């Protein structure tokens, strides 16, 4: 029994924490509006949080910061949180929420500079911890502006794990 407890605590204390991720994405911004549909590009940093601990080993609270830009010059800078649920060590389901600053550029006016993003990611996590998946989200000002047309996007993303710097083994 002592050896079991020693082994359990030794491996628990020395287990590597989940990595941070640098994410790149591209896809369709304003998916449901033909007139305003355009390609978008996203960069995002997803943190492993030592403060927000989950009691469930398959759930991780992951703070994030990011930016998107479209070919029409629309920009959105945001911060938020994902709730990473990992099944079978490979299938990621991650609902999330963010809030940020919106600049319309030559794109559609969403009605207010403060916009909220809610969405869900579905991805495959590879053995090296990298992830490839799709992210569907809705961007809206939650009716705090005079107008609230909102928009939906779908992007293909690739998460690069950051383990002691960039690890490209």
Image: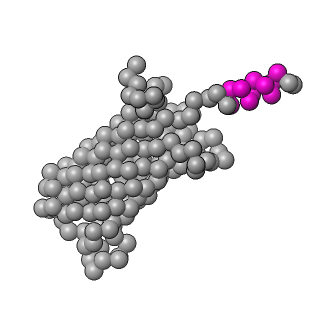
Instruction: Work out which residue is located at the far top of the displayed protein and give it.
Output: 169
Quadrant of image for the N terminus: top right
Name the image colouring. one colour
Instruction: Determine the residue positioned at 32% across, 68% down.
Output: 114
Q: Estimate the x, y position of residue 65 in percent, counting from the top left.
A: 38, 50
Residue 26 within the magenta-colored segment of the rendering: no
Q: Is residue 15 left or right of residue 35?
A: right
Compare residues 161 and 26 and report the one nearer the observer.
Answer: 161
Q: Quadrant of residue 43?
A: top left
- The residue furthest bottom is 146
Left/right placement of residue 1 relative to residue 121 reads right
**Is residue 122 visible to us here?**
no
Q: Which residues are magenta?
A: 3-12
Q: Nearer the viewer, residue 108 or 49?
A: 49
Residue 75 seen by the camera: yes
Question: Magenta span: helix, strand or loop, mainly?
Answer: helix
Name of the residue lying farthest toward the right: 1
Camera-side residue of 88 and 118: 118
Q: Position of residue 145 (x, y in %)?
A: 30, 77
Residue 138 horizontal/vertical position (percent): 35, 60
Q: Magenta stretch: residue 11 in it?
A: yes
- List x then y, in percent, for residue 155: 30, 46
Relative height, residue 109 to residue 124 (above, below): below
Q: Is residue 137 above or below residue 5?
A: below
The vertical placement of 79 against 160, above or below, is: below
Tell me which residue sits at (60%, 41%) in the image: 58
Count how many numbered circles sit on residues in the image: 0
Screen quadrant of the C terminus: top left
- Position of 156 with respect to 39 (left or right) is right
């Amino acid at each position: 029994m002592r050896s079991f407890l020693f082994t359990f605590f030794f491996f628990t204390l020395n287990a590597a924490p989940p990595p941070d991720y640098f994410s790149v994405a591209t896809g369709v911004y304003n998916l449901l509006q033909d007139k305003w549909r355009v390609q978008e590009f996203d960069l995002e940093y997803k943190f492993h949080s030592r403060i927000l601990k989950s009691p469930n080993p398959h759930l991780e609270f992951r703070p994030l910061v990011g930016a998107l830009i479209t070919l029409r010059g629309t920009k959105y800078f945001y911060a938020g949180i994902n709730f990473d649920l990992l099944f079978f060590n490979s299938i990621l389901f991650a609902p999330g929420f963010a809030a940020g600053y919106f600049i319309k550029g030559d794109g559609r006016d969403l009605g207010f500079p403060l916009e909220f993003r809610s969405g869900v990611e579905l991805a495959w996590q590879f053995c090296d911890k990298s992830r490839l998946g799709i992210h569907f989200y809705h961007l809206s000002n939650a009716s705090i502006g005079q107008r609230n047309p909102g928009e939906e996007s779908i992007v293909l993303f690739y998460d690069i794990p950051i383990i002691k710097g960039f690890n490209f083994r």
